[in-house]
Amino acid sequence: MFSSSLPTAALLALLLPISPVSSQKIGTAVPEVHPKLTTQTCTLASGCTTRQTRLVTDALAHPLHAASDPSISCTSLPASLCPDAATCAQNCVLEGVEYSSLGVLAQGSALTLRQYLFDGTQFKSVSPRLYLLAEDDHNYEPLKLLNAELSFDVDVSKLGCGMNGALYLSEMDMSGSRSDLNPAGAQYGTGYCDAQCFTTNSFINGVANLNQSGACCNEMDIWEANGRATVLTPHTCSSPGSFLCAGAECNRTAAGSGVCDKDGCGINPYGLGAKKFYGPGLTVDTSRPFTVVTQFFTADNSSAGTLSEIRRVYVQDGREIPNTAETTSTKLGAGFDGSITDAYCAARNRSDFARLGGMKGMGESLARGMVLIFSIWNSDGDFMSWLDGMDNGPCNATEGDPTIIRARTPDVAVTFSNIRWGEIGSTFNVSATGGEAKAAALTVASAGGVVGVMTGSVVGLAVLVGMLLW
Ligand SMILES: *[C@@H]1O[C@H](CO)[C@@H](O)[C@H](O)[C@H]1NC(C)=O
Ligand SMILES: *[C@@H]1O[C@H](CO)[C@@H](O)[C@H](O)[C@H]1NC(C)=O
Ligand SMILES: *[C@@H]1O[C@H](CO)[C@@H](O)[C@H](O)[C@H]1NC(C)=O
Ligand SMILES: *[C@@H]1O[C@H](CO)[C@@H](O)[C@H](O)[C@H]1NC(C)=O
Ligand SMILES: *[C@@H]1O[C@H](CO)[C@@H](O)[C@H](O)[C@H]1NC(C)=O
Ligand SMILES: *[C@@H]1O[C@H](CO)[C@@H](O)[C@H](O)[C@H]1NC(C)=O
């Protein structure tokens, strides 16, 4: 279980301006105790400093029920409780959530996320999504990565076809769009937005979404991956910060009316033709942990400059592995060196990315500050084939089916650890002997150890034991 020295409900009472008439109430039945996940900020001159950051899951993963009767859910906006946003806020109570029940294990600097948990009868999909909170445990941590880099270690060895273990950034409001109608804010995981501008959420920024708005913002997908394929993708939007879209604005951008670039301008090595670069036993060996470094260069190498290049580097066994420049597309030609640039996006015809700001726009968002997000998920709709199937990866048409994943490998999990950001060159080391990288790999292995290797009929029992240990 997670420990906290702070009684959370009491702390909330102290911190939050309680506006008695119109605000969404904060429940007292389940305290909201945020798992601790240490992170580091680094400089070339002074090395890395450890920070006591925390995690919060999305507001919609918290129970939201009628103040008058906890058995009545507010999540689907029942008309009797939610005729308008102010009445809805008054009638509904947002409760805390027990993080181990969500498939979340944070220990020190390592975070393990699981897709399924055994509930005693069957494997239930939990599919957690988490946001990084600042040391104040009140607002999100603003990552400002223009002219900077982000590194982390990842273990994708238990993440097969159809799974997506993601680490990415969205330009959410740092308070979670806290407001009179939404006093909880970031402490209960409100304010989510991304470049898909989903219109299906019943609440946006903690306020009832009664007119099918979508929540949009710039999104930088640092890491969407499993053990078979990986993609790095900036997505731009027409406006800074988090904003609402209506009607056709929320649609796919091909027609030129959309306000965010849903497809993005990504690099997937396999998709470009480098089929032997990333996977079990390949150049980046996904059967073992490795370090992922993402660097955001500006044209003049100053933090006031324009984003010119997003560069990916891997470190495994102390060895630096540059992103592959191999491609079968003659259009990308000799100029492609494994990085994302405006020239690369133009060669790939990513016209919406350019129309909505291109590298310059993405860089401005990185400079303003974005929220770090972790998730694990799979997809009934497309089996994640845009990531690892068809021409994008080695997975066949059925392997990514969530029904098959749940039946065959219910222990699917991803572990992220040693998350650090700062000046370019300050967040990772390369060693001739490989000693440091091996030490880092050991840390990951022991933190993720509870998931272990589980096969056949012992899976259920082992996962149940795992749950109890959590
Ligand atoms: C939808 O509702 C939100 C607040 O609830 C409001 O800010 C927005 O302007 C509305 N959109 C339209 C198109 O009316
Ligand atoms: C936007 O998408 C919706 C839902 O798919 C569709 O009904 C509508 O016609 C689209 N609008 C435009 C202008 O493309
Ligand atoms: C910026 O830094 C990179 C990496 O150190 C270097 O290759 C590049 O030449 C520098 N650019 C300028 C304009 O100084
Ligand atoms: C980009 O579009 C042009 C013109 O429509 C086409 O010739 C080219 O093949 C496209 N390139 C890619 C990488 O799809
Ligand atoms: C897809 O791969 C799985 C093994 O992972 C195999 O059992 C299945 O038969 C394959 N399906 C097709 C259509 O090739
Ligand atoms: C890299 O190595 C230097 C020298 O040993 C050390 O001071 C620094 O903390 C290391 N940086 C990281 C990110 O491990």
Image: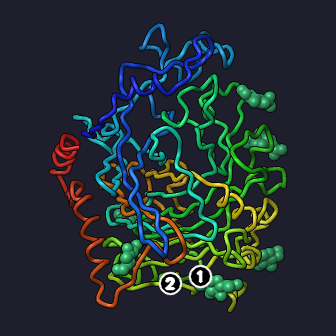
Q: Which mark is residue 338?
A: 1
Q: Are marks 1 and 2 in contact (CB under 8 Å)?
A: yes
Disc 1 element: loop
Question: SS at mark 2?
Answer: strand
| Side of 440 where 143 appears, left or right | right
User: How many angstroms separate mark 1 from mark 2 (CA)?
Assistant: 8 Å
Q: Residue at x 79, y 53 (%)?
A: 238
Residue depicted at 16% across the width and 51% down the height: 457
Q: Which image quadrant: the N terminus?
A: top left
Q: Residue furthest top?
A: 68
- Please say whether residue 70 is visible from this viewpoint: yes
Q: Is residue 316 visible?
A: no
Q: Earlier in the sequence, mark 1 or mark 2?
A: 2
Q: Residues within 10 Å of mark 2 (few under 14, many from 20)?
A: some
Give the x, y percent position of residue 173: 63, 43
Position of residue 207 relative to residue 275, above or below, is above
Query: Horizontally, is 265 left or right of 121 in the view?
Result: right
**Residue located at (21% from left, 54% from top):** 450
Q: Is the residue marked by circle 1 packed among few (<14), some (14-19), or many (20+) residues within 10 Å?
A: many
> Dot 2 corresponds to which residue?
322
Mark 2 residue's CB less than 8 Å from ligand 3: no
Q: Position of residue 458 (x, y in %)?
A: 15, 51
The residue lying toward the viewer, choosing from 136 and 377, is 136
The quarter of the image holding the C terminus is: top left
Find residue 160 and report its image quarter. bottom left
Decide which of 381, 190 is in the foreground and name it: 190
The amino acid beneath tag 2 is Pro
Residue type at numbered disc 1? Gly
